[in-house]
Image (spheres, coloured by chain):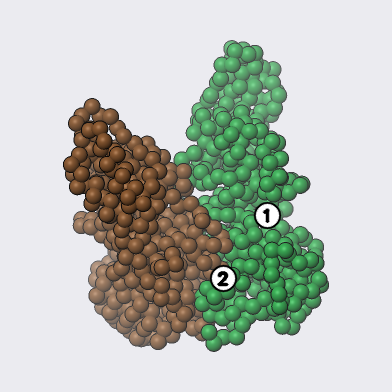
Chain colours: A green, B brown
Amino acid sequence: MGLKPVKVGICGLGTVGGGTFNVLKRNESEITRRAGRVIRVEQIGARRPNPNCETNGVQITDDIFAVAKNPEVDIVVELIGGYETALELVLTAIEHGKHVVTANKALIAEHGNEIFEAAQRKNVMVAFEASVAGGIPIIKAIREGLAANSINWLAGIINGTGNFILTEMRDKGRAFGDVLKEAQELGYAEADPTFDVEGIDAAHKLTILASLAYGVPLQFNKAYTEGISEITTEDVNYAEELGYRIKHLGVSRRTEDGIELRVHPTLIPEKRLIANVDGVMNAVLVDADAVGPTLYYGAGAGSEPTASAVIADLVDVVRAMTADRDNRVPHLAFHPSHMSDLPILPMEEIRTAYYLRLNAIDHPGVLAEVTSILSAQQISIDSILQKGTGEELVPIIILTHEVQEKQMNQAIKQIEALEDIQGAVTRIRVEQLDAN
Amino acid sequence: MGLKPVKVGICGLGTVGGGTFNVLKRNESEITRRAGRVIRVEQIGARRPNPNCETNGVQITDDIFAVAKNPEVDIVVELIGGYETALELVLTAIEHGKHVVTANKALIAEHGNEIFEAAQRKNVMVAFEASVAGGIPIIKAIREGLAANSINWLAGIINGTGNFILTEMRDKGRAFGDVLKEAQELGYAEADPTFDVEGIDAAHKLTILASLAYGVPLQFNKAYTEGISEITTEDVNYAEELGYRIKHLGVSRRTEDGIELRVHPTLIPEKRLIANVDGVMNAVLVDADAVGPTLYYGAGAGSEPTASAVIADLVDVVRAMTADRDNRVPHLAFHPSHMSDLPILPMEEIRTAYYLRLNAIDHPGVLAEVTSILSAQQISIDSILQKGTGEELVPIIILTHEVQEKQMNQAIKQIEALEDIQGAVTRIRVEQLDAN
């Protein structure tokens, strides 16, 4: 290969940084034969060595900013995670004319607009394939593979921890808290699991996907986020009985009025391929006008799967380094001067179907009261499941057709005010995920 | 957008050509916002108009070679299909310095090496995303998305007609011939269905995928091809009983000795996601060393799904047109001077597990005879299903562990020679498709 090596500086040598270093080394020959030149790790910025990495011969510094400023480095790989320092590091690298590859979804979702603007000014690229769904090349698929399409909607299982918990709850009838504890022991979930189980991590990724799909600026602060900690095995079982599975989905749909951007537990028909994505695996389903539905499945996290995406970005950046700005793939799929100003819809404005579970005192007439409330809010019913328990309180499960969330909120408030209804109404959104 | 329009000549205005024209027109604004410039259809080469296309204002000629030579055209889109004329057209376009986009799997699988060499000489690109699995961006995924990986194996449902037939056989217990007739009436299958049901079409696509995955030249003539016309509902049902589904798979695995390249009916565990890919849909499962298993699913054929891939290629070509050769993605993923010479293994050398169905005369000792033949060939048994039918002939179903095909051929010959075995042994290969 005649071209001179490209020199990379890796900042952060933890799980992903170590994996990136190791895969670059192990597959050096294949990667070089593909990229047309050697991708060489010139310097590593890390506070401590990684016992899984033999970094012999590579210069290591504990000053990551030295890497970002190193005149010998062409591309800076940000794998330190977190917000402030990562942002400063990436902006420093850009300021010094380096291209950047990052796996940091929080950083991109919350500071991407600023970062891309800085990159645009300095004529460098910021690549972030590893920030969504780990090793699945979903950003490349949406940004390049579906470039012909007007995208209608996308739905993703984009948090492995949450999917592992829901899979265990369904397969083994275990309770949420019980599985969460195991996930923490297995290292799937953090000590503070909020980011994963409350959907913040998924909302970061969904924010990125929606921008790529529709060409709107990143607007993480407008995403609706609801976690899975309130899901009970009872609901998992009723869903099953109705032919559905409960998954923690990120859903983003483009409507005439705006873009839906929401993460929440969702009933989906068990026949859909994505309903059968289990354990820690991720999948993203995209519905687009020309191609129809396509689905992308794989490992959403982990050392080497994430490294796979980081290195794919490196190869892409290496190829596009000498191209002028207009011939590069735009950061958010659409050229920055041609973004869409379609607003993100408030949650009250979204339309979806619902699963409702109510605890009713077993009196004649209670079902009539409930259904007349729904009917007054123009909510039509798809199916009802009423379980005779022999006890005073009977569960009623209702699947509705699509309606605006605002109306459902009204209906739920009225149902909860009924004398014969005890406690809060459980409400889980339902998506058919069929092509238009 | 400041850059000047890119001018495209479309040759062939049938199903895919018409779809390409229509999607380019309908989504012109979004495509332009992504590509950074207008992609304009300068000329169409077609013998007759397509009633679904309003080509007003676009120059139409019935001489496709005039398009290939038109000095105003930057990129020639070959959508005429077939071999000789398509080859001549593509080579003429290359000779005239045009980039080429094609959806022609037969052309690429059988003449790709020659075409890419010519393109390399003239410093132009030939893009062929639409040639495999229609709208699924599988070529992009393997060639770019998985660039960090050493790929272990891939397995694909890459012929929609065959998958439709097998899905109907399983879901409705219908016979092969009956479903084939319906598929022909629905337009899924050609009047001569050989290409689809005998696996030739799938072998074309598999040949392309294997070259992209392992960096070997295209060698369609070495692919093993077995169709689905001998599959009976009986086997579909036994497979089901054993926890498997029968799919017509293209399988390519890299071993130390060479590359397996084979299309045949295959039992796969029903729990695998790919086992649940039904109807005319396609999916490709790839197992790679860093990322693990990833799967790509979508429509494998049809007017607009195929157009989606053709146009994605156009956008890619537009972006890379001004790049020098070494900065473009190599045609077969690896730089042409660095291809692998790993041979394609003859079918006798491949290793897989097997489903065997024998018709035995209900004598004591027949099972002992069969199992001792298997044992002598070092074939170990995973499970046996023997059905008491009350008739003189009883079916025996055997699932084996992995063994070399050569040994299985020996064993089958010997089993068929047994006095108590009637007729031929039915043999279907079994793949677990689990990650290594």
- In front here: A50 or B68? A50
| Residue at the spot of label 1 | A204
Q: Say whether residue B256 is left or right of residue B34.
A: left
Above or below, comparing residue A394 to residue A355 in the picture: above
Q: Quadrant of residue A73?
A: bottom right
Question: What's the amino acid at mark 1?
Answer: His
- In front here: A90 or A314? A314
| Residue at the spot of label 2 | A27
Crowd band around label 2 with a 10 angstrom C-alpha radius: few (<14), some (14–19), many (20+): some
Above or below, comparing residue A192 to residue A174 in the picture: below
- In front here: A428 or B396? B396
Residue B201 visible in image? no
Crowd band around label 1 with a 10 angstrom C-alpha radius: few (<14), some (14–19), many (20+): many
Q: Position of residue A423 (x, y in %)?
A: 71, 24
Contact check, label 2 and label 1, Cβ < 8 Å: no
Q: Position of residue B398 (x, y in %)?
A: 33, 42
Q: Does dot 1 land on a helix, a strand or a loop?
A: helix
Q: Position of residue B92 (x, y in %)?
A: 31, 83
Residue at x-position 26% and y-position 50%: B412
Q: Earlier in the sequence, mark 2 or mark 1?
A: 2
Q: Quadrant of residue A43?
A: bottom right
Residue at x-position 69% and y-position 60%: A15
